[in-house]
Amino acid sequence: MNKLVGITLIALAGLLCGCASFKDKPLAPAKTAADFEARSLDDAGLRRFVESNLHQRVTSWNLPALTLAALYFHPDMDVARARWGAAEAAKVTAGQRPNPTLSVSPAYDTTTTIPSPWIVTASLDIPIETAGKRGYRIAQAAHLSEAARLNIATAAWQVRSRVRSRWVELYAATRSEELLRQQEAAQAQVVKLLKVQLDAGAVSPFEVTQAQIAQRNASLALNEAQRQRAEARVALADALGVPARALDGVAVSFDGLERLPAVAASASDARRQAMLGRADIRSALAEYAASQSALQLQIARQWPDVHLGPGYEYDQGDNKWSVGLSVELPMLNQNQGGIAEAKARREEAAARFIALQARVVGEIDRALAGYNAALRKAATAETLLSDQRRQRQTAQRMFEAGETARLAVATAETEVFTTELSRLDALVKVHQALGALEDAVQQPLLSPASRVIIPEKNPRAENTPSTK
């Protein structure tokens, strides 16, 4: 009897030795806030990450470099990776086999001591899953893990989209500030010349007042552009996942934004690229496959599992062995409820996928229409600007020939800057429309060979030097 108890205790101790233990990992808000404030584009790990992916040294922070910085720092990427980690852990859970159960029931007979008053019953319950339930669980977990992995790509594209949008906004505000400063100076020159003519009696005070109002409006517009530029820098820093001060002294390159982009894209080509390349569509397909496996699992649960029950009884000196077998009898239900729920969830997953497809097609059609319209408007603005510049050159030549006054040249100069601002607005709208089209396709269209890097592992951890 004592030997049996000892063996049981040793077996239990051996099993418990393999158990995991809890390790507290508290969050310290003060430390996480300090870590965020310490982020900088001069971070050595960031430099290594960017340069290893661009295959060149970082000399300017253009869109590709800024995108990589956002993928390195932005917390949305950490959230997506954490969700994938949880889905991967669920695969381990799905593959686990049910543990056997050991039951020990000691008893003591007080009416006799010979040969032994002890009666000890020990039994095992060994569950055996049937109908391939474990395989269906593993398949479902694998599909959900794949969907979570693809959601990392979706998060990466959304991060890139926000960076591109804020980058274009910063360019628009910076360029507007430059043009408005020049326009204000040109308008001040007009006011100065008009005052000279006013003193000579050649113009009325009303004309001078109108020119002064135009100068003040240019000053107000310049102040607004300066405000927008400051806000745009903060918005860009937020899109990168760094504090605003991380952009202090950083020269952002707007290479590629000064030119009018021309992307030849048909609706059919864009749709095909989206259906083949968009990560959210592929993720929705993986979720539908998971719903299929979930339905297979519920159908398999119509078949009951088998429980083997070998047992041993020490009965006052007698050793007795037994073997039991138990099976749930599906008499009151055959898991109809679980099957019905799984079928409904599969229909829901199919409906979500079809709705996503329809939404993507609508996004592509709207983006293409907006992009083509923006291109036409920008082309008109380019033509108008060319005409305005020729008119300024004509006024300059006439002034040099003594055929017109200096005021005509200054007025033509202000009109050029006004047209420059209109052309800038049209150009920015083209780039914004191009960004919407890229978001609909989830591919860079100006340089199709340039793919968005998807860091499935945390690059900050990989680029941290080892302390060992």
Image (tube, grey):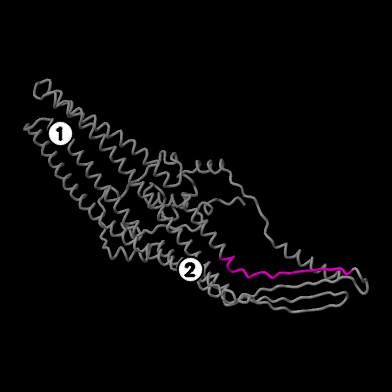
Of marks 2 and 1, which one's residue comes earlier in the chain? 2
Q: Which quadrant of the view contains residue 440?
A: bottom left
Q: Residue at x 11, y 36 (%)?
A: 395
Q: Nearer the viewer, residue 225 or 175?
A: 225
Label 2 neighbour load within 10 Å: few <14, some 14-19, many 20+: many
Q: Locate residue 86: give its quadrant.
A: bottom right
Does residue 207 show up magenta in the picture? no
Which residue occupies the extreme front position in the image? 332
Which amino acid is tagged 1?
A: Thr
> Secondary structure beneath disc 2?
helix
> Could you say which disc has been placed on residue 291 in the image?
2
Q: Label 2 is placed on what type of residue? A: Ser
Instruction: Specify the farthest residue to the left.
Output: 403
Is the residue marked by circle 1 packed among few (<14), some (14-19), or many (20+) residues within 10 Å? some
Q: CA distance from mark 2 to mark 1?
A: 69 Å
Q: Position of residue 262 (x, y in %)?
A: 25, 56
Q: Position of residue 176 (x, y in %)?
A: 28, 39
Would you identify the image quadrant in which residue 451 lies? bottom left
Q: Which residue is mark 1?
A: 411
* Horizontal and vertical percent position of residue 279: 41, 62
396 or 303, which is in the foreground?
303
Nearest the viewer among 130 and 375 is 130
Report the magenta residues as a range.
Answer: 91-109
| Rendered view: 406 above or below 451 | above
Residue at 42 percent of width and 50 percent of height: 57
Give the residue displayed 67% in from the left and 75% down from the top: 307
Determine the secondary structure under disc 1: helix
